[in-house]
Image (cartoon, grey):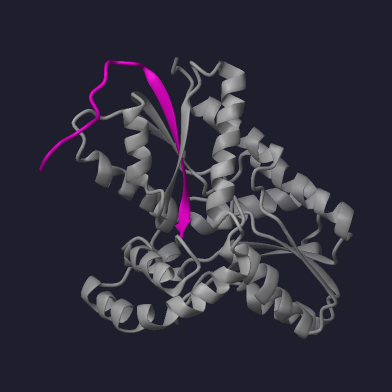
Amino acid sequence: MKYHNHPHPSSGRSGILLTNLGTPDAPTTAAVRRYLAEFLWDPRVVEVPRPLWWLLLHGIILRTRPRRSAHAYRQVWQAQGSPLLTTTQRLGERLQQRLNQQQGAASAPLVVVAMRYGNPSIEEGLNRLDAAGVERLLVLPLYPQYAAATTASTYDALYQVLRRWRRLPELRWINHYANEPHYIAALADSVLRHQQQHGQPERLLISFHGIPQRYADGGDPYPRHCEESAHALATALGLTPQQWQLSYQSRFGREEWLRPYTDETLKSWGAEGVSHTQVICPGFAVDCLETLEEIGEENRDSFLHSGGKTFSYIPALNDHDSHLELLTTLVNRHTQGWA
């Protein structure tokens, strides 16, 4: 194995690798196929024996799913590109500005954004940090709740790159912030701001991305983290048990995933006569296909067609000031002792 780094004198500089899941480069079938091929081949995402999964992935899924997914991406694509990428990049820029203001541009950690799948890759982000002389690195995945398929997969990708480096940075990372007070306060603030414009619903649905039930049975703490976040948010809003519910969205395949399912919950609410509902997705730090299209369009239509009258999606924290306050707090806490 060949080891390499960018040669530079000792600087003592710190860096922040701010990561998110990723996105196709374009809302086209070809671009989505490339993205899904990388994403779905990750053994953290799909825990199926590789030979069998290779046949299913390349023989069926990548022949059919990219076209449907590309159509969905076109519904949310913006003039400047993927909403997940552009918002994450804007969030990184604002975090850099906030840290510069606090610590001075010469002393503040360098913030670099990277995607677990697609571009800019984690390898590209790490190379940028190395070229800048970063010797201390804090990894901050934008996943409030830990899951092996997201947070742990990020670390897998990180170490796949670092294992080829001769000089490794001092490493720290943030596993989750599911019950961080600043996170809960930011979520509660986003709900209240939304309700000032759209009114108070009969019920609030707190929807998280699902994972297969067997992952949880195998020890993944993700559902516990989701429950902690949901209960803390409901408590902060002063909601009674009848006014809110936790659910899980985005299931894939035929096996059992975490329940209750978001789509089935909304359909049942509409059929029961619930007139007004709002949905928040606290597991998504910035808006993306799963929030804007799956919740904002597909599940909205399901609720209304089932008998509901008023539906609205509460946007993710995105680059709102409260989100910047949360991330700045996390960075300052986890970089203590770094000059």
Left or right: 208 as drawn, with respect to 185 = left
Residue 279 or 221: which is nearer the viewer?
A: 279
Residue sitting at 31 percent across and 81 percent down? 56
Residue depicted at x 76% and y 85%: 306
User: Farthest front residue?
Assistant: 79
Q: Is residue 320 visible?
A: yes
User: In the figure, residue 307 lies in which quadrant?
Assistant: bottom right
Q: Nearer the viewer, residue 223 or 136?
A: 136
Up-down: is 69 above or below 19? below
Residue 198 percent coordinates (x, y) = 86, 60
Which residue is depicted at the point 63% across and 54% down?
282
Q: Position of residue 48 (x, y in %)?
A: 30, 72
User: Which quadrant is home to the N terminus?
Assistant: top left
Q: Which residues are magenta?
A: 1-23
How many numbered discs, if any?
Answer: 0
**Percent from the top left, x then y, of residue 266?**
71, 76
Q: Is residue 198 left or right of residue 188?
A: right
Q: Position of residue 283 (x, y in %)?
A: 58, 55
In this rendered view, identify the residue nearer to me: 276 or 133.
Answer: 133
The C terminus: image quadrant:
top left
* Residue 265 placement: quadrant: bottom right
Q: Is residue 255 visible?
A: no
For residue 298: magenta? Answer: no
Q: Is residue 317 left or right of residue 213?
A: right
| Vertical comparison of 192 with 4: above or below | below
Q: Residue at x 39, y 30 (%)?
A: 137
Name which quarter of the figure residue 40 lies in. Answer: bottom left
Tell me: 75 left or right of 5: right
Relative depth, front residue between 243 and 9: 9
In the depicted structure, whether residue 235 falls above or below residue 108: below
